[in-house]
Amino acid sequence: MKTRKLPTLAKLKKIAWKLLSGCIRREAADRLGYVRCYTCDWVGMWTASQAGHAIGGRSGAVLFDESIIRPQCKRCNIFLRGNYGIFASKLIKEHGQEWYDQKQIDSHKTVKFTRSDVLEKTEAYKVRL
């Protein structure tokens, strides 16, 4: 009898990210399901939007940091590579330069998630959805 392999940590992170992305986009949507791009003011259904990071990289320190994740249109998130100039300036207006500078510093830190960390996040995101 074959034993089932456990999903890899990378696979678990991918699942958790998909759920978090859904949380970010749905929570930003109005009662009809429309969401506004954080960087260009495009408006569309939450399902047509993406969750973008204000700081580049998909490292552990940035990946699940909800304070720097906002809904974005595909144009800003993919084709304009995050539209970081506008993204950063809006976050600085909201939280201040010192806060943003600390986020930049934190983004370079190595964060190692365990399987249980990621599974815990996954369950929390499922509850939010």
Image (cartoon, rainbow, N blue to C red):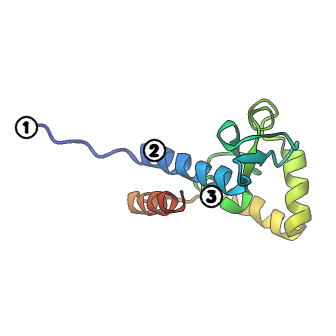
In-image side of 2 versus 10 (left or right) = left
Residue at (60% x, 57% y) in the render: 64
How many residues crowd mark 1 within 10 Å: few (<14), some (14–19), many (20+)?
few
Q: What SS does tag 3 mark?
A: helix
Image depth: mark 3 or mark 1 in front: 1
Residue 31, relative to residue 83: is it above or below?
below
Q: Is residue 59 visible?
A: no
- Residue 84's quadrant in the figure? top right
Residue indicated by mark 3: 61
Horizontal side of residue 116 vs 65, given as left or right: left
| Residue shown at the point (55%, 49%) measured from the top left | 17
The residue singled out by tag 1 in the image is 1
The circle drawn on residue 10 is 2
In this rendering, position of residue 93 left or right of residue 124: right
Figure check: 129 above or below 77? below
Circles 2 and 3, Cβ within 8 Å, touching? The answer is no
Asked whether the beta carbons under mark 2 and mark 1 sit within 8 Å of each other, the answer is: no
Q: Up-down: is 68 above or below 95?
A: above
How far apart are the alpha carbons under marks 2 and 3?
15 Å
Q: Which one is nearer the viewer's eye here, 58 or 37?
A: 37
